[in-house]
Structures are given as structure tokens and as C-alpha cells.
Amino acid sequence: VKDKFAAQIEAASELRALDDIRVSALGKKGEISAMMAGLGKMSIEEKKVMGPALNGLKRDIAALIEARKTVLEDAALDAALASETMDMSLPVGRAAGTLHPVQQVMEEMAVIFSDMGFSVAEGPDIEDDFHNFTALNFPPGHPARDMHDTFFMKPDADGEQKVLRTHTSPVQIRTMLSEKPPIRIIAPGRTYRCDSDQTHTPMFHQVEGLVIDKGIHMGHLKGVLMDFVSAFFETDVDVQFRPHHFPFTEPSAEMDVRYERDGAAIKIGTGESWMEILGCGMVHPNVLRACNLDPDEYQGFAFGMGVDRLAMLKYGMPDLRDMFAGDTRWLSHYGFDP
Ligand code: PHE
């Protein structure tokens, strides 16, 4: 009996087959269990011999099965490992991401302005009408509210309708209401307008600037912005200030920089053509009053510029929409090491 089972166990090539053998030998209805049951009918003399013999047989068979089981399990593990090997020579590529060009450019701007004594301020992306429009001297029902292609939120329980801020100018209001002059801040952040084409995305970025102090005049505004563009484009940049209109500044202007085409690329600084890059002006007396400042005591200037377009100009990207498409090839090409 032992030799028969030993041979079967040795021949078993799968754990399943081995278990069948265990059942047929040691199971309740198995052969060895049947032999044990036969002990009852034996004489005392026979029992003395057969009892230990059968127990020994049982132990031996169990041990053989256990040993074979270990062998088969090891083999199964080896097979699994062999089929799941990793190719250690395969390059895994760059695990680390890069700084988005917009983030990079906002940081470059913060460095330039901090050298001029500005600190960074922030406000919420979801604004109320007061900060985004009213305090900035947009009269109720003024068409400029529509011109901004505003994203309006659903009115809340009190009937108040918030907006996605259409510009970073509401941070001017928040700053003037929470800090005492002298104020010298920039406010980088996301802005939103319901607009999308080759040169517009519904979400874009601006950097706002605000200076409030006694005796501030337009010469300060021009000096700061001229120094800024030359530092930003890392070359002497010729600029012009063109009269413009914003409700929250008076007088208002747009600043243009000279540029020329160099093949497909655009070179900023010199050339025949002008390109508008920012809006600016002296803070309107109504805005100062809305922030509890006396226009006879304090004056100031403000400016706002589109970060995405300045990033495109500085780093030569052809299409604004690529900025926010989330294509990792574009991101690793134009991204910056953090
Ligand atoms: N908020 C204006 C815009 O989004 C820009 C601006 C800012 C103009 C500050 C003047 C002063 O177009």
C-alpha cells in the first residue's frame, strides 16, 4: 500500500492531483482509513502489531504528500515569477513633472516686481459683484459688465449672484479695504471670460499691479512698467502708452511694445510694429472712495496684463490653446525644471 501511494504521489504533477491522492488515501472514505476501521475486528495480538503499523503508514503517507506539495508549490511560484519578469533595462523615462510655462512666467514676474518692492496678494476666483464690478466703478447695468463676457453663478439662497472673476482687478479692492497705504502689490491669478478662439481661452491668467501712496503720478506708472518689460524680455524694449478707457482708472492707457517678425518667431523690443501687452492707469477717485480712501490724500496707479500671451511671446509658443490642452509632450517641451 505504501509503495502504491508513494508512486502516485511522486507522479502527481499538480497540486489538485496531489489533493485527490490525499483524499483517496487519508480521507474519511480513503483506503488507509478503511484499514484503520478494520482494526476493530482484530484480536488483541493483531491490533498490537497492526495498530502502530497503520499509524506509521498514515504518518509516512502524510509526510510524502507534504513534501511533494512543497515541491509543487515551489515550481508554481517559479513559473509565475518566470512569466512575470520585468525588463530591468527598459527606460522608465522622467518621473518628475515640469513647471507649466504660465507658472514659470508668473514667478519670473514676481521676482522682477519684488525687486521693485512689490509683494504678492491674492483673491478668490469666485467673486461677488461688488469686488469684480461695482467698487471698480462699473455702474449697475453698465455695458462693460456684458463686454467682459462674464460667467455668472446661479443665484444663492439670498439671491446673490456670484461671478467667476473676469479680471484680477478685484484684488485691488480687497487689498485697499484690508491694508493701509502705502500699498505696493501684484496679484497673479486665474481669470475667466466666456470666450474661446485661437487667441482666447475661457480661463486665462493675469497679473494685476497696484500702488497707492501720497503723491503718486503717471511718471511712476511709466517708470515701473518700462523697467518691468525690459527686465521681463531681457532686452531694451521700446514702449508707447496709448490713451484708452477703463472704468476704474483715469486717465487710462494701454502699453504697446515694439516687435518684428523673424521668420516664424516674434522678436520683442525693436521693430516697426506695435503690440499691446497691458492695460493701466491712475486709480479712479471713485475706486479710492469705494475703499474708504480720500482721493485728495492718496493717489495710485494700477495695471493688468495677460500672463499667457506674455509667456507665448517670451518662449515662442504658436497657439494659446496648447497652453491648457494637457498634452504631456507639449508640457515636457515647454515646461521648466522646478
Ligand atoms: N482689468 C483690466 C482688464 O482685464 C486691466 C487693467 C488693470 C487696466 C488695471 C487698468 C488697470 O482688461
Image (cartoon, grey):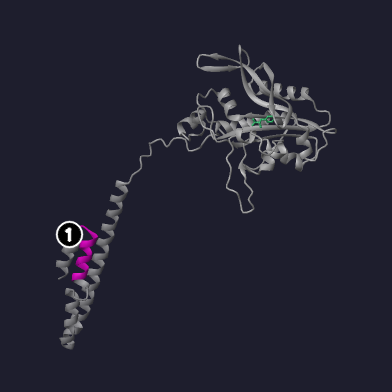
Residue 45, placed above or below residue 256: below
List the single residue furthest toward the front.
Answer: 141
Q: Position of residue 34 (x, y in %)?
A: 17, 78
Looking at the image, which residue is at 78% across and 33% down? 285
Image x and y of residue 199, in percent: 53, 27
Left or right of 301, for residue 278: left
In the rendered image, residue 148 lying in the magenta stretch gets the answer no
x, y percent for residue 280:
70, 27
Position of 215 relative to 43 (above/below)? above
> Would you place residue 331 above or below residue 235 in this image?
below
Give the quadrant of residue 104. Answer: top right
Quadrant location of the C terminus in the rendered image? top right
- Res. 275 image quadrant: top right
Give the magenta-colored segment's residue range. 10-24
Check disc 1 and give the amino acid type. Ala
Seen in the image, is 288 located left or right of residue 4? right
- Residue found at the far right of this picture: 297
For the stretch drawn in magenta, the main secondary structure is helix
Graded by Cα atoms within 10 Å as few (under 14), some (14 to 19) or many (20 or more), the crowding at tag 1 reads few
Residue nearer the viewer, 4 or 134: 134
Q: Nearer the viewer, residue 139 or 300?
A: 139
Q: Which residue is mark 1?
A: 11
Q: How many marks?
A: 1
Residue at point 21%, 81% (across, down):
51
